[in-house]
Image (spheres, helix red, strand yellow):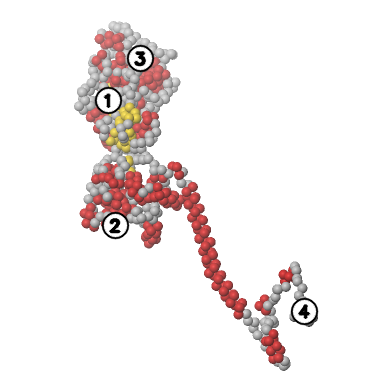
Amino acid sequence: MAWGKKKGGRKEPLFGLPAALADLRLTAADRISGGDDKPKKSAKSSAKRKSDDAGDEPPRERKAQPSRSGAKRRSKSGGGFSLGRLVYWGAVLGLWGVIAVIGVVIYVGAHLPPIQSLEIPKRPPTIQIVGIDGSMLAQRGEMAGANVSLKDLPPYLPKAFIAIEDRRFYSHFGIDPVGILRALVTNVLHRGVSQGGSTLTQQLAKNLFLTQERTMQRKLQEAELAIWLERKHSKNEILELYLNRVYFGSGAYGVEAAAQKYFGKSAKNVTVAEAAMLAGLVKSPSRLAPNRNPEGAEARAQIVLAAMADAKFITEAQAKASIGHASYEVKPAGAGTVNYVADWIGEVLDDLVGQIDESIKVETTIDPKLQSVAEAAIIDELAAKSVKFNVSQGALVAMTPDGAVRAMVGGRNYSDSQYNRAVTAKRQPGSSFKPFVYLTALEQGLTPDTVRQDAPIEVKGWKPENYTHEYFGAVTLTQALAMSLNTVAIRLGLEVGPKNVVRTAHRLGISSKLEPNASIALGTSEVSVVELVGAYAPFANGGLAVTPHVVTRIRTLSGKLLYMRQPDERNQVIDLRYVGMMNTMMRETLISGTAKKAEIPGWPAAGKTGTSQDYRDAWFIGYTANLVTGVWLGNDDNSPTKKATGGGLPVEVWTRFMRTAHEGVPVAALPNSQATWGLSNLAQAASQVSPPTAAPSAPANNGGYRPPPPPTRANARPEAAAGLDGWLMDRLFGGNR
């Protein structure tokens, strides 16, 4: 055409929504097929169908067929869904697994000790306790031998541990996945935990930084610390640390301590068989320790030898030759009653040297020979007579007159009961407290020959009686003390004042609280064995106060002196003349009084028995110029015994111990005894003179001294002046009161 119009006509531009929908076309595949719908066909097929349908024949129904392209798309889409989703969810789960692992690592790491504290800790300090002769008595703390270098050990010793505990030690990074998998398979096959997967590094990490609890958190911490150790230290350093820190049973830590304990030699000198036994102990130290289970230890050693041979560390011939050749000798580890001494030392150690951060040696005053004798005396006596007298426990303390404890038994059996009845327990001393009453009376002007009435007495409704329920009338103080007459002691206590009696006891060394009442004269306030024995020491040393002690020096293992005991100040707590009087009076207890069974051939000895109410406690405290020893017997529950008295079992124990303790020791007299009464049997001499009759003296209102009543005999001399001089004048001129 003239206007050059293009075929198809002019096409106007479209904008907006019409433009967006201009190219939108629906195809047959986009239609939703209905029940009567038929698929559209091309124009050619449509024309052909029209010609075919020109007749009256009705059209035939055809089933709708999906297009071939749509089927292909759905087929591809279905296959892609399965594989893609599998990859997708696998990636998601893997990512969450990684996140979970990181979270667990962070959580476990957050509960580890601070990183600044993750240094190899020092060995816990060991306390070695030795006797006066330098022999080992006991040990407290971990028994750790000196560190030994790996190069100083025989090569088969560390290899024994590698063979049985961690065969892949030199190839893993602190954790052994192969070992864990092997242990897991083994445990599943055996349906239980029969094999562990921990490496030597993990065991070291546990020993150094963690507890022994069996929890998943602890195992994870152990794994983290093992990796940390591997990065910080070489394999040989880790192995050396392990050998010096691992526990071998019976308190032994490290191969050196274990070798010394079980074989009596250094770890540098152990044989192949001994090395195998040491390596075998690590699995179960308490159960396999040779001193407890020699058969089990030997059987385990054979397993280690087989493992060493299998790993080619030793030959088969060496393994067979070493079976049964571990000649172990278990050293006794300060067992028995000496542990009561060790516990007492542990209680006072902090006061002496404060907190310790290195191993120390404590030198003591304990004589191992006397300790053994004391232990046997208590144990044998109770074994023979505990049932008869219903006595289950006993205690003994022996010390020199200056307070140095030579032996201490705190109970019948330390393994059964660690309660120290010599130091911790406090019991009523009974009549063994009376010397403090009589000393107070002497210091207020009375003498051993002063006469007092042994007769019934009542104090505010209280009617104390003598043990025998007998009364002897007028008796001397010496007789009253030797025979342990209760009524005389009560009268004296009231006469001199209970508060003064308490002051005297405290002055001599009793530290327990004492009640200043009338019954104090019969020992109703409780005291410990060690303080009562210490309070008797001034009678044996001339009147000087002492402090019972057991530690003389404390040194580090390298020899540095940390503590040395200084001698006690010479504090005179009893005048020497009263020491002589008391020694003479208490000698009569052993000669004619309640302790007549107590005898040490050739040795002058003195002492006092004691029996508390209802026979609950039986005591005897006796002494020579060489040793002061106290014995207590009774029951922990404070139940009555079957009439066990101080003059019975305690005297027998005391005599057995003291006789042995004085064998070969030069005889020495009691202090000031030469200047005192020279007759050996004062009670017998006094009994030959008719005692005067006198009424019981009433206690002074001010607690002071009241002169004794005048004698009734016409030819009796007036009472001599108070004190030692007057007492001697009376005896020399035949006076009797």
* Rendered position, 314 above or below 8: above
Give the image quarter of residue 176. Answer: bottom left
Q: Are marks 2 and 4 in contact (CB under 8 Å)?
A: no
Estimate the x, y position of residue 345 in percent, counting from the top left.
35, 32
Mark in front: 1 vs 2: 2
Mark in front: 4 vs 3: 4
* Rendered position, 266 above or below 673: below
Residue neighbourhood size for the residue with mark 4, other residues' Cα within 10 Å, grouped as few (<14), some (14–19), many (≥20): few
> Mark 1 highlights which residue?
627
Indicate which disc residue 443 carries.
3
> Mark 2 highlights which residue?
311
At x 40% / y 19%, what residue is drawn? 503
Name which residue type carries label 4. Answer: Lys
Image quadrant holding the N terminus, namely bottom right
Q: CA distance from mark 1 to mark 2?
A: 64 Å
Q: CA distance from mark 1 to mark 3?
A: 25 Å
Q: CA distance from mark 4 to mark 3?
A: 156 Å
Mark 4 and mark 1 lie on one chain; the one further toward the N terminus is 4
- Dot 2: element: loop
Residue 645 visible at all: no
Name which residue type carries label 3. Answer: Glu
> Mark 4 highlights which residue?
5
At x 52% / y 59%, what residue is drawn? 95
| Foreground residue among 600 and 95 | 95
Q: Are marks 4 and 1 in contact (CB under 8 Å)?
A: no
Mark in front: 1 vs 3: 1
